[in-house]
Amino acid sequence: MRIGAQYQGNHQCEFTVWAPLREQVALQLEGPEPRLIPLKQDIDGYWSATLDDIAPGTLYRYQLDSDLLRPDPASQYQPEDVHGPSQVIDHSAYAWQDTAWSGVPLKDYVIYELHIGTFTPEGTFESAIERLPDLVELGITAVEIMPVAQFPGDRNWGYDGVYPFAVQTSYGGPEGLKKLVDACHQHGLAVILDVVYNHFGPEGNYTRDFGPYFTEHYRTPWGAAINYDDAYSEGVRNFVIENALYWFQEFHFDALRLDAVHAIYDFGAKHVLAQMQETVQAAMQTRAFPAYLIAESDLNDVRVINPPEQGGHNLDAQWSDDFHHCLHVLLTRETQGYYEDFGTCNDMAKVFKDRFVYNWSYSKTRKRYHGSDARHCPPYQFVVCSQNHDQVGNRMMGDRMTALTSFEGLKLLAGAVMLSPYLPMLFMGEEYGEPAPFLYFISHSDPDLIQAVREGRKREFEAFHAEGDAPDAFSRDSFNQSKLNWNLRQEGHHQSLWVLYQTLIRLRRELPALQMPAQGVESLTADCVGDQVILLQRWCDSQKLACLMNFQAEPVVQSVQIEGRWQKRLDSAEVSWKGPGSQAPEVLEVAQELTLSPHSFVLYETAQTAASFA
């Protein structure tokens, strides 16, 4: 069932809203002389009417039981913010220029996560277009946009959205978003949209007035869970599946990143994510480029991506948080919270090989066994990173890795992510070592809610009082401080880091041994050599690469037993990378000792197919 205001041309529009428990629903057309039009209900609880005198731009609300007046839950535009009327949109009015676009294969994704409001000084879709050539020059192949569903005010991370179909007004609305996606495709970039199907934001959320969108059977960090398997859940399932189709069909997105699917509770025989994938793929069969669903999940559960015949939801990819956690602890030595479960060299070696560290093994933090074996899944089904909006922004001071490790450490992080067999993701500014924080910020209009956010943040960071108070999330300063400083990318160490990322991305594309294999287990080994050194080996046919990564803050002398002749390809410690100077030899052969500089990696290449390290 298509929901919302579906403009059909020639001033004809069909209005459909799901409200199964209401006795009466009417459409109120806003204007100098408001009109109230009764809607008819079908057996599934959908109320609808098709009108012949509706122009694009028409404002409307729904009247429920002759009492409440509410915006459309499936509103496609909220020009007067979350409490105002909804607006009819004519999607056919935009002339797409991407007819030649054929997409990017998932295995070739190099993802760049960005927040529209802080990506540029203007913080709009159209201003982001100006930066696309920079991303192409870097080697990015897929842009991931943090949520743009309408939220209160003009600044927010996006996870407080309350109208999943409406594009944020302060960013540029539906037309601005289409222009950005269109421009990305013309630059050869795929586009991923971050969508939230596990909760609604707290302000402007009127879905409860329309129907049982929530269930008390499960609780999430945001309260009652969205109703995917309780009474009347079919209308809710249709709502989110229609939303996924909407982004693919009307905005030409290449993929959706599904936020925190571990907070989507559905114990029915067919999980809503499986139904979503099934519906999306059926609808996209005639499209010239693919549509992917990528799950953010901390479950380490391969059922998310396993095919239906194996009892899975059949999504295209999922995150591996374990990869990030291993890197973070090795570089920062932080062990609080869930970081307690990570930190050894063996953990890092395992996640390079096995996708997860916890694959039905005991977690001290969870105090139970966690995860499943993912080695049968191709590596391109896993997204990895060294930082992202959550890991940066959920810190009290919004610290990027730039503030938590040395410049040498930043280069080591780049090498670990880019030389892995997985889909790499960068968080905006990471490529040049952006020093600005990425803080948590909101612009709610409810004073009580603003105060509740402040108090909640204070409680969250009680353990950090020695560092001072968390920045005020409501302050515009928190938002402005989080904007990127693009001019830095052409200066000193920032420029050197940018060129390193560019070089690593190019090597991923050009070297056969770094190409994304179909399975990957047989063409990769990773071992812990000594206490804090990882030896990663990847090969393809006659080409073999060996990368040694030193996670210690001091030089390491490592004995190497080697067959054949190995040529150094890249050494992050070299002066050319603004390093302290490398002691690693240009050529490795016979048995010799190798000196690795602190927090560095060195990449060797050989035509030989056999090598052993001790």
Image (spheres, rainbow, N blue to C red):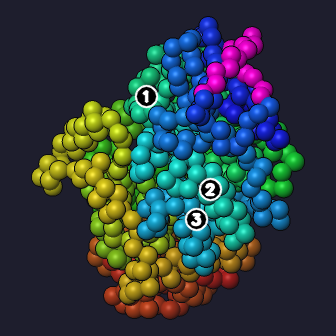
Q: CA distance from mark 1 to mark 3?
A: 35 Å
Q: Residue furthest front?
A: 32
Q: Quadrant of the N terminus?
A: top right
Q: Are marks 1 and 2 in contact (CB under 8 Å)?
A: no
Q: CA distance from mark 1 to mark 2?
A: 30 Å
Q: Are marks 1 and 3 in contact (CB under 8 Å)?
A: no
Question: Mostly what secondary structure, the magenta segment?
Answer: strand
Q: Is residue 457 above or below residue 222?
A: below
Question: Which segment is the magenta one?
Answer: 34-51
Amino acid type, residue under disc 2 in the picture? Leu
* Percent position of residue 211, x then y: 57, 17
Residue pointed to by mark 3: 126
Disc 1 element: strand
Residue at 57% x, 16% y: name it: 64
Q: Residues within 10 Å of mark 2 (few under 14, many from 20)?
A: some
* Percent position of residue 472, x then y: 25, 50
Residue at 40% x, 91% y: name it: 575
Residue pointed to by mark 1: 220
Q: Is residue 36 magenta?
A: yes
Disc 3 element: helix
